[in-house]
Amino acid sequence: MDWWLLFEIGLAGIGSGGLYALTGLAFVMIYKATRVVNLAIGEMLMFSAYMLLAFTTGMGLPIWLAIPGALLVSAVFGMLVERTLIRPMLGESPISSFMVTVGLSSILVGLVELVWTADQQRLPEFLPTDAIRLGDAFISPKVFYGFWIAVLLIAAVLLLFRFWRGGVALRATASDQAAAYSMGINVPRVFSMAWMAAAVIAGVAGIVVGSIGGLSSVMGAFGLSVLVVVIFGGLDSVLGALVGGLIVGLVEALSGFYLGGEYKILATFSLLVLILMVRPYGLFGTHEIERL
Amino acid sequence: MTSVPVHPSPLLAVENLTLAFGGVKALNGVSFTVQPGSITSVIGPNGAGKTSVFNTISGFYKPATGRLVFEGQDIGQLPPPRRAALGLARSFQNIALFRGMTVLDNIKLGRHCHLKTGPLSALFYSPAARREEEELRREVEEKIIDFLEIDHIRKAPVASLSYGLQKRVELARALAMRPKLLLLDEPVAGMNREETEDMARFILEVRREWGVTVLMVEHDMGMVMDLSDHVVVLNFGQVIASGLPHEVQGNPEVVKAYLGAGDVSVLRERFQRVAQQARKAA
């Protein structure tokens, strides 16, 4: 057995796991604040990547302007989705808002195919391209930098969760909406904020994913793995999203290499079934969550 | 009917409140006032509309008609957070603490509406944020925790506490909002005698030491009669009596609402005996 090879594959797995964790964090944020299972998270990620494409290749803006621009548009988009699609579903059964997000994901795929066709597109290169060596193991530079971007952003979000007023408001809202509302926390604004923040976080992931693997109208399938991550870790657990992200990334990389790419999904979903049999609420989930 | 001297400007005036869920009128022309510095109780049989009154005052329900005047300002259209900022705080019938957080975190959240730290300074923990945090800590720790005798559990997660202590933490959290009017929804429901007495003492001290006006819903008649300056009796969404505790107790309408019509002389006697004992104890 080639240990350096195993090490290399493990590193690649952790690299993509970081992006899963990041997107999982966006998913959990939405679920915690609004109790909506957002199946469109993968398509929201795709949306941001295409926005970056529009700003760079389309409008010719420099990358340092285009990235904040794409993220800003993503934030506004997240707010609009919450305001127009999610808030009217308040008080309806969880299945209804769940179905709304399924609809949203189809609409986004359709829009992307209308505007950019279903062909693969490439983002301009903006991450350093020198290969990175650790001993005898090579790491793709994009995966390497993407991972660190994910780590930094996750750290920032966790700090905000803990210390910022808005983060505290979000945790309080997640815990008891009525109590939070009566204590001066503006719950509707927390909803908006959670969707905006999640759209931006998913947007960062989308831009990195897009720059690693290119853009296409099926890149929302990334969201499928993220769904595995959050069910695995527990829908309402930030820690679960982070641990789940890394584990799913590793399992995908290892099974993809040793069994072949077509077994990647099979391996992760088998793992999911196993976990759900032992811990139906995920590794770190609260035991009261709604069953869908 | 009432012999409480009517203050020229009540702290809260509920005027002709009507609230309907579909065809069911939960509240039907409810009016009463809460005088500043008083302890006012709303009582009534189950389903009389007590909690509906509370939810309307704190802004969860929008009344069909009627006005809510708080310190001379019509607050009927304000969302709950604005009402909280004006000085309305409440506790809940079923404990509504933030589970998974400690007692101290829960209490601190009560001060949330008065904080101003932005996201960037929180991220980098600037001196301003630290100062604000420290000031907050001092105020919260020294006053409220001592006052409510929960010093020994401040670091404990709320889910691990007994029911009576959780209720007390809920009161602490409401106090941390520095309210002018404290709405207590069944503060001693499900408590044993000792816990009830503690809570009654705290409510009296809240009024005396903090100058907070209290409006409460409660089923424990002994406590209502002991503490209240003014009692409002609801039945089927309407005010059927209001006044001093002993006036309300003797009111035949009230006795009928609680015990049903018919030959109730025996039960009435019992009811009055309990009330007398309560008065004696006071």
Image (cartoon, rainbow, N blue to C red):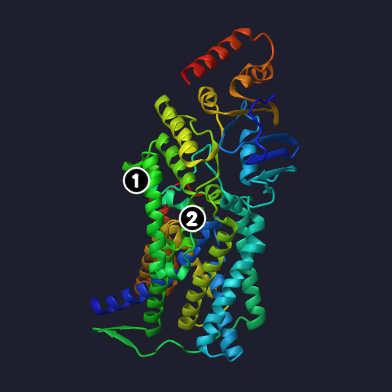
Locate the N terminus of chain A by quadrant: bottom left
Q: CA distance from mark 2 to mark 1?
A: 20 Å
Residue at image mark 2: B112
The spot of residue B74 in percent (x, y) is 69, 48
Q: Mark 2 or mark 1, which is nearer to you?
A: 2
Q: Would you place residue A49 above or below residue A226 in this image?
A: below
Report the chain holding disc 1. Answer: B
Q: Which mark is residue B156?
A: 1
Which residue sits at x=46%, y=18%? B281
Q: Secondary structure at mark 2?
A: helix
Q: Amino acid at mark 1?
A: Ala
Which residue sits at x=41%, y=65%? B129
Q: Nearer the viewer, residue A183 or A56?
A: A183
Which residue sits at x=44%, y=34%? B202
Taking A95 as reference, is B117 left or right? left
Q: Would you place residue B20 above or below residue A35 in this image?
A: above
Q: Residues within 10 Å of mark 1 (few under 14, many from 20)?
A: some
Corner quadrant of residue A120: bottom right
Marks 2 and 1 close (CB-CB < 8 Å) = no
The spot of residue B152 in percent (x, y) is 31, 42
Q: Amino acid at mark 2?
A: His
